[in-house]
Image (cartoon, helix red, strand yellow):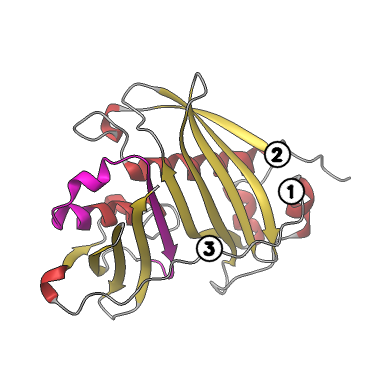
Amino acid sequence: MTRPVVPAVHVEPWHVRFDECTPDGTLRSSVYLRYLQAAAGIHSANAGYTRDWYAQAGLFWLVRTADLRILRPARVDETLHVSTEVIGFRRIWARRRSEVRREEGTLLAEAEIDWVMTSAATGRPARIPAELLERFPTPPADFDPGRVELAEPPADPAALVVDRRRVEPHEIDPMAHLNNAGYLDYIEAAVIAGGDEAALRRVPRRYRIEYLAPAEPGARLAGLAWRTVDGWAWRLRAESEVELARGLLSGG
């Protein structure tokens, strides 16, 4: 028997907690990504595709790119409505669009996130099962997967911010690697180290991140950040020099 399609848009209410906010009482940028990831998981589980289902199928989703625009700050103790919708499938790819709104409807943030279906056995991309394509009412979409292109960093070492760190236990998620939102925290740490904390309070602002390889528990990492015409560029490498992620922070 064919199972019915699921609602195209799922909206999840979220209460902004004290510990999710910065000293000025606004929601940390990375928490928006955590909300969007959680809403996507709930949308999938409501359709019957729980973590157990994926484990039995030998599949999982990995975030490949995130494009987040913060338009207005959310504040501590606000109740937010976080929406998620699959807007396109492409062989191994799925694109979700999300919005974060106040209860009265004001748009605070929006994002598009590209996910890649992955084989648990090989760690390589895998075709999206036909039944998932049938369950989600998504029109055909010939989208180009997101990319983050970086220019070469400045030759002057004084223009570079080097941020060395280790992946800590509290940063690891159930996939046993650094959660995708953690990379945004790393970008912001580098920007602060570069003396531009004000850039993290500007609105609108936009974060684009491309995830290239997972950062494993305990891995020693080196972040490199530098100023661009309209913000900051950032690159993350493992101790082995393997590039793990790249990102851009700019005006919205």
Q: Nearer the viewer, residue 127 or 197?
A: 197
Q: Secondary structure at mark 3?
A: loop
Spatial separation of the CA atoms under disc 2 and disc 1: 7 Å
Q: Residue furthest top?
A: 104
Q: Nearer the viewer, residue 132 or 73?
A: 73
Who comes first in sequence, dot 2 or dot 3?
A: 2
Q: Position of residue 150 (x, y in %)?
A: 37, 71
For residue 34, above or below residue 230 = above
Q: Is residue 139 magenta?
A: no
Residue density around tag 2, few if under 14, some if 14–19, many if 20 or more, within 10 Å:
some
Who comes first in sequence, dot 2 or dot 1?
A: 2
Amino acid type indicated by mark 2: Ala
Marks 1 and 3 in Cβ contact (< 8 Å): no
Who comes first in sequence, dot 1 or dot 3?
A: 1
Disc 1: which residue: 138
Q: Quadrant of the N terminus?
A: top right
Which numbered marker is on residue 8? 2
Q: Is residue 204 magenta?
A: yes
Marks 2 and 1 in Cβ contact (< 8 Å): yes
Q: Which residues are magenta?
A: 189-214
